[in-house]
Image: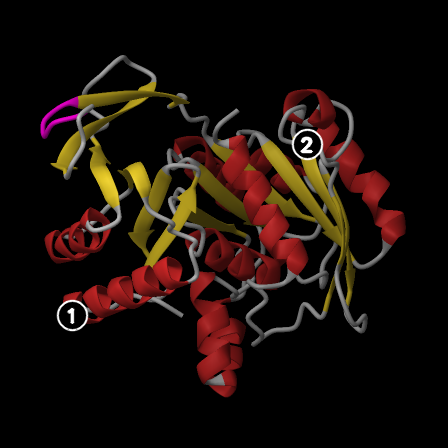
């Protein structure tokens, strides 16, 4: 795994730091160079007239990218989000090597729309012992691993002793994690519900993930009220209707209905081919994403599971709707 990420989409090279693999500058530079050379050797970066670079770069990484691309492209331009027509992406030409069309300092305004992003507050809900905490941590890691994705802010709205710290602690020291959970676990009181609801209401990241307890209770009704969407995870398919009715009463759009199957061997993922083009229409009455997920067990990193990766993709897309 590389500490720096690159992905060519058409003529745009998306770049950025790998947030699940933090590293020092020297490691990042070496990784950026290695990945660039791999992509060039495999013709993923083929060379040509121009290339546009979109994403965060440290100064050392920018030198590496510029050096490699200047030998392949006549024009290299870098995104500046502060200039150009509002709502559209504009790039500044930084390298003009044999180009008669562009010179350094020219602006390239593209047709790529830069939409106003929507804030998503999604509740992970469903019966107890379905694996919601495992899904929460895997989902956060999966989103962080997506190049250019918003930061996923997690709200633990259930005092069950399994905060965001629990999964990593469990992976490294299971007895300690179990002892801490026992000491921190408490009941959901009306006072806690009001406080947690305020956390949800005040959350202002683009992706906010709210983990709630396993009951369709008055307390959860208070906590979930300020949210926008819901993901229902249940080991018992007969419980889906109860939770769907509960979410509907609160005005939450259920974007995913996932059957948790502890002993299954693989995930089953169902997502319409045109879901991105018809997102608002499809999510109005039915979940966008359905299927099952296997082996939601404490201590396992599930971020690479197909269902988790698709759910991460859906949440990232919803911020653009």
Residue 3 vertical placement versus 92 (above, below): below
Closer to the camera in the image, 18 or 5: 5
**Is 278 a magenta residue?**
no
Answer with left or right where residue 116 lies relative to residue 94.
Answer: right
**Is 105 a magenta residue?**
yes
Q: Give the image location of residue 35, x and y in percent.
A: 34, 63
Q: CA distance from mark 2 to mark 1?
A: 41 Å
* Residue labelled with disc 1: 26
In the picture, the disc for residue 275 is: 2
Q: Give the image location of residue 169, x and y in percent.
A: 44, 76
- Main SS of residues in magenta: loop
Residue 150 vertical placement versus 80 (above, below): below
Q: Label 2 neighbourhood size at 10 Å, few (<14), some (14-19), many (20+)? A: some
Closer to the camera in the image, 261 or 183: 261
- Secondary structure of the residue carrying tag 2 is loop
- Secondary structure of the residue carrying tag 1 is helix
Q: Label 1 neighbourhood size at 10 Å, few (<14), some (14-19), many (20+)? A: few
**Mark sitting earlier along the chain (2/1):** 1
Image point (53%, 35%), residue name: 317
Q: Quadrant of the N terminus?
A: bottom left
Residue 159 vertical placement versus 80 (above, below): below
Q: How many numbered badges does the structure rendering display? A: 2
Residue 264 vertical placement versus 221 (above, below): below
Image point (16%, 36%), residue name: 98
Q: Give the image location of residue 142, x and y in percent.
A: 50, 56
Image point (48%, 31%), residue name: 319
Is residue 216 visible to us here?
no
Magenta range is 102-106
Closer to the camera in the image, 86 or 217: 86
Q: Give the image location of residue 273, x and y in percent.
A: 72, 36
Closer to the camera in the image, 146 or 63: 63
């Amino acid at each position: 795994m590389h500490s720096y990420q690159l992905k060519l989409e058409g003529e745009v090279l998306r770049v950025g730091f790998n947030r699940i693999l933090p590293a020092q500058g020297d490691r990042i530079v070496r990784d950026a160079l290695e990945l660039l050379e791999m992509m060039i050797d495999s013709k993923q970066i083929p060379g040509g007239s121009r290339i546009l670079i979109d994403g965060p770069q440290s100064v050392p990484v920018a030198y590496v990218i510029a050096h490699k691309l200047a030998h392949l492209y006549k024009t290299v331009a870098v995104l500046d989000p502060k200039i150009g027509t509002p709502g559209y992406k504009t790039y500044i030409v930084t390298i003009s090597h044999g180009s008669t069309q562009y010179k350094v300092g020219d602006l390239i305004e593209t047709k790529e729309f830069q939409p106003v992003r929507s804030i998503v507050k999604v509740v992970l809900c469903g019966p107890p012992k379905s694996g919601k905490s495992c899904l929460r941590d895997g989902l956060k890691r999966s989103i962080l691993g997506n190049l250019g994705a918003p930061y996923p802010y997690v709200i633990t709205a259930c005092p069950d002793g399994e905060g965001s710290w629990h999964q990593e602690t469990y992976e490294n020291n299971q007895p300690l994690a179990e002892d801490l959970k026992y000491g921190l676990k408490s009941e959901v009181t009306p006072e806690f519900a009001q406080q947690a609801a305020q956390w949800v209401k005040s959350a202002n990241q683009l992706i906010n993930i709210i983990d709630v307890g396993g009951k369709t209770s008055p307390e959860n009704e208070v906590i979930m009220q300020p949210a926008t969407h819901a993901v229902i995870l249940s080991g018992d398919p007969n419980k889906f209707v109860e939770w769907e009715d509960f979410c509907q009463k609160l005005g939450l759009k259920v974007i995913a209905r996932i059957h948790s199957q502890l002993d299954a061997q693989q995930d089953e993922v169902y997502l319409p081919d045109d879901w991105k083009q018809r997102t608002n229409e499809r999510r109005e009455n039915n979940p966008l994403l359905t299927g099952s997920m296997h082996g939601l067990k404490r201590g396992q990193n599930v971020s690479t599971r197909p269902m988790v990766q698709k759910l991460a993709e859906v949440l990232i897309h919803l911020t653009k709707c």
